[in-house]
Image (cartoon, grey):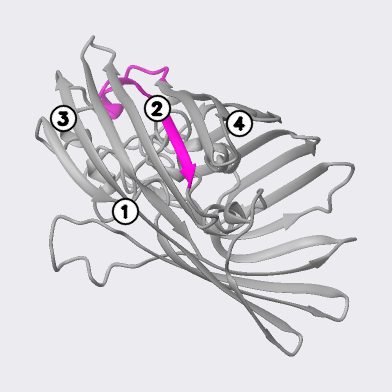
Amino acid sequence: MKLKLISVAVASLAVAQSSYAVDIKAGDWTVSVGGIVNAYYTQVSCKGGTVGGLALGSVALGCGGKSNRTVIGNGLLPNGLITSVKSRQGDYDVAATLGIMAATASDSAIANNSNVDVRQGFFSFGNESMGTIKLGRDYGLFGSNATLGDMTLLGTGAPVRATQLNRVSLGHIGAGYSYLGNYGQMVYSSPAMGGAKVDFALVSPVSNNLGNAPGGNFDSGSTPQVQAQLSYSSSGMKLWIAGKTQKFDGRTPADRDFTMRGVELGGSYTLGALGILANVQAGQGLGILADGDQENVDSVNYLAQTTYKVTEKMKLGLSYGKSRNRDDLAVNGRLKSNSNVTTGVYYSITPSITLSGELGQTRSKGFDGSSAHMNGASLGGIFFF
């Protein structure tokens, strides 16, 4: 139930395989303590011209200003210590989760000792007839299925140096799908109805703190961000449709207010050893790495992936993702697209340890005809306990 722990660490969604968290019984309570530790040797090489905006394949972001870089750091998942509790009290199932994350790599031997990233801290209550209500900080709904289904969740995907130091690699974030985000939220999840399920979230609105202008020019509005998802699962198949919206307020008279709007449609299917996944997102203000980080730019993201289990322990995979801007604007540095193709092999040497090797290329293009690319290779492993 290895990926059950991934789901707690990534989006608190149930997926196949089992974690090896330690369960402690104390009266009516069950306390589970588990975690994730990973490290990958990544080597990147960048070539090409200067592409503006958040160009992930550029020398500036992909390789940190040099033509070649090496990092031994996290993959798409961080290191994490995850504690959860659950109990049955009267007519309700009650539970809570606290996830504390930490990075593997920095560019200092001493400066990263105290950096922690508390991505999760929430409680929930409900039952089979009413569904579940969740209150607290957790991952968002929009983009969750694409992220959880990404084969590079057990690897690195795009090992962009700008994010891998002190945080994680990107997988297909910004080059296939937008990051699912971490938010304060109130979520209602319906009971499963013939395989169908609805999730609705009121989310604490966020500011544009990654905009091209210093500090970002847009603040969160007076109303919450709203996210919703309808999903259906049956016999190895899963389908989903999701959406999110939030108003951003300009901080100066020159900055016009805008509303982020996004829709998502996707599906996955497993037939024996073969697995396929496809996901499309489109909207305004979705951003590259965070909500609104390109302001009100119209964009589309798509991801296609196929995997095949050669043996019970070994899986091969190929994935391609692209994030394309439809607007040629100065505010996004005239960035046209980021794309990433990754091929990987994933081998479970024990139920707790998966080793992986990946090769990939991340390519960025500008509306002015400029282009740059980052070739990347990674080798390492992930441990679940």
Asked if the residue under mark 4 is in contact with the one under mark 3, i.e. CB atoms within 8 Å, the reply is: no
Q: Earlier in the sequence, mark 2 or mark 1?
A: 1
Q: Which residue is mark 4?
A: 263
Position of 43 with respect to 179 (left or right) is left
**SS class, disc 4:** strand
Q: Which amino acid, mark 1?
A: Arg
Q: Which residue reaches farthest bottom?
A: 27
Residue occupying image coordinates x 59% and y 60%: 185
Q: Which residue is mark 2?
A: 342
Q: Say which of marks 2 and 3 sits in front.
A: 2
Q: Earlier in the sequence, mark 3 or mark 4?
A: 3
Q: Where 141 falls versus 367 (above or below)?
A: below
Q: Which amino acid, mark 4?
A: Val
Circle 1 Cα neighbour tier, 10 Å, few/some/many (<14 / 14–19 / ≥20): many
Q: Which disc, if any, is residue 59?
A: 3
The majority secondary structure of the magenta stretch comes to strand
**SS class, disc 1:** loop
